[in-house]
Image (spheres, coloured by chain):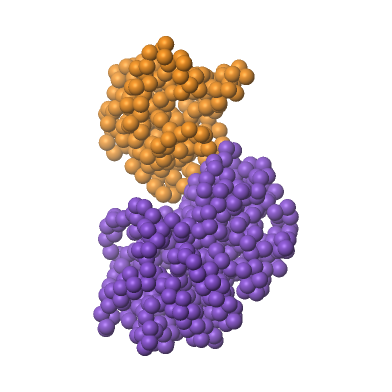
Amino acid sequence: MSVASGQRRTWIVLGASSSVGRAFSRQAAAGGSDVILAGRDTDDLQRTAADVALRANCRADVVYFDAESTKDHAKFVDDCMRRGGPMDVFLLFGAMPEQQAIDQDFALALQTIGVNYVGAVSVLSRLVPHLEAQGGGRVVVLSSVAGDRGRLKNYVYGSAKGALNLYLQGLRARLARSNVSVTTVKAGFLDTDMSYGMPGLFLVAPPEACAKACLELSAKGREVAYFPRFWWAIMTIIKSIPERIFKRLSI
Amino acid sequence: MKAKELEITGWGRFPRAKSLALRPEKPAAAAAAVRARPAGGLVAHGGGRSYGDAALNDNGHVLLTRRLDRILAFDPERAELVCEPGLTVTELQDFLIPRGFMLPAVPGTGFATIGGAVANDVHGKNHDRHGSIGDHLRWFELLTADGDFRRAGPEDDPALFAATIGGVGLTGVLITLCIGLLPAPSNAVRVTEMRADNLDHFLRLLTQYRERATYSVGWIDVLARGERFGRGILEIAEPAAESVPVRAGRRVRVPLDMPGFILNRWSIGAMNACYFHRIPALGRDRVVPLGQFFHPLDRVLDWNRMYGRAGFHQFQCVVPDAQAETGIRRLLEAVGESRAGSFLAVLKTMGGAGKGYLSFPMRGFTLALDFPARPGVRELMAALEAITLEHGGRIYLAKDSCLSPDGFARMYPALPELRNVLSRVDPQGVFESDLARRLHIRGDQP
């Protein structure tokens, strides 16, 4: 990855409203970058932008972004690029309705795929030409261990994340030719708004630690990593269970 | 919003409450949570550093504020900061001190949130000179029972302003606060420590230094008897001109609940003697980073586990100047007779009344003690309450788990004004807490 020295970079944070997005924005700014906070609740994001700018003495802008509204993504990317300077991308938006709710309402299945997969592909594919043109940079995507294997409990969400992980493999190959790294972070349980109050979670990781891992993994140019790291072991076991047995399990 | 079932305690780990905890990450989510009319009522819960039941709501909901943690504006010209309630004192100080400012009132722990600091109108070691946090609050936005945000300040709905300062969370959830700041010429203070040989000497020193020193605080050996009765160490401090390097403080953690017997009057007596003799007879002088000066105990994480699983009771009262000498003496005598032995005993002066209807401060002397929760302690707490009342004093709600409703009403004469505001902004009693029920703060209980 070639980063022109001296030039101030900007992290585009797609899904900045979440606790991981907030923590990441603060840490990226503390590391000397500017940030673009992208999300739907722009009123609230203005509060985050004020916080990030004050703490790190950097520029923090808010741009409206709705993952599902793919027709607006080209304009969104143009708006970001108008600021000039080299960009890095952190994509962490997601939607995780309960599988039971999805089973009863196909619209929810569409939305799950629409946000987690289609929305991600849409915005990334619009960003790609710019990243190629700048000839260097970093893309980090916060994905999920759920994408490693379809499970009874959340297979629609899992399938969308799994598809995203496959997409990122190809994108990585493409962007490698332009010196842009693509890091897939497969997250286990995170202590976020999305998971708060859900039963059966264990060893839940704080958002600040997740944000730190995302920054560090991408700085190292890592391709795929689990966070927290021990999920590598858990998923290795889960992936190794034969389908004949796995289909009877209710995990 | 999803809720999580939690067993929550205050810092004293007594009492315990089972609650459904909500944890909004933005104001709109907090408002939605209030509009949903949570069963069993709701109270904001910040750093969990009030000792008793002020931020507990057994069989009801609590709203955890720690994720409302953004700094919104910082204006060096006006010396003010606008922020969300879930930031801790230490987080704010870490932001402010390198920029040449500091919070005007800093409590004994940096883990308290700024929202909780206002809700308890906390004070620090500079109360005589600078007052409590409510004295520096310029305005706030409060999420009230109807799910709307109301702004209040000294001119803008002053009754709601006064009801919220020290109002133990009963008017609503603070969402945005604007606080006036003090300049911080450096990150350190120059501390002078000196021995006080007995209570008379101690009170004389405190009286002398309350006007002269920016910071003053006394540690008192409650187990000393005879001519040493009331001996201790007085610490006074002034802002240092130059900063000192701050090492990333090594923090120690108390890893498990200590057996209850570890803290007894012999072990405490031995520790007290060491603590006293640590300071040379002629006193000593040193420069200390602000964090270490304000929060000496924060280096020991979970120090409350020293008291074992049963927890402990904290007692803090203030007695007006005129009655302080007899009042403090009688309080210390009662503690001595009970042989309860208090590990941390703090004696200091306060400058004047706070701005809130339930503000704790008044001009006088304040004594803080803690006692392991053991048989006989409740009787002692009742005795201390009676002595406090007799001397025209009051007990600090942030520390309390034992006060009686009757004693409370006598200590806080502005209670009717608070009730007026509550009947206006929260007629149905959405905001509730164990402390409010125990002390009949709303007045509608038998």
Find residue B202 and report its horizontal and vertical position in percent: 40, 84
Q: How many dots with numbers?
A: 0
Residue B326 lies, in percent from the top left, at: 51, 86
Among the chains pictured, the one given orange colouring is A
Q: Quadrant of the C terminus of chain B?
A: bottom right
**Apparent side of residue A100 relative to residue A137 in the rendered image (left or right):** right
Residue B245: name its quadrant. bottom left
Q: Position of residue A34 (x, y in %)?
A: 40, 39
Q: Give whichever of B266, A58 is nearer the camera.
A: B266
Please provide percent x and percent y for residue B418. 68, 65
Q: Furthest residue to the front? A: B375
**Image quarter in which the N terminus of chain B is found:** top right
Q: Residue at x 41, y 85 (%)?
A: B199
Q: Is residue B333 visible?
A: yes
Toward the top, the furthest residue is A244
Q: Is residue B179 left or right of residue B275?
A: right
Compared to residue B295, the image places residue A59 above or below, namely above
**Near-viewer residue (B114 or A122):** B114
**On screen, residue A194 above or below A251:** below
**What color does chain B have in the rendering?**
purple
- Determine the residue positioned at 42% across, 18% down: A149
Residue name at image x 40 percent, y 77 percent: B222
Looking at the picture, tell me which residue is in the foreground, B125 or A244.
Answer: A244
Q: Residue, x 29% and y 23% (percent of image)?
A: A179
Can you see residue B96? no
Quarter of image, res B29: top right
Residue B156 lies in quadrant: bottom right
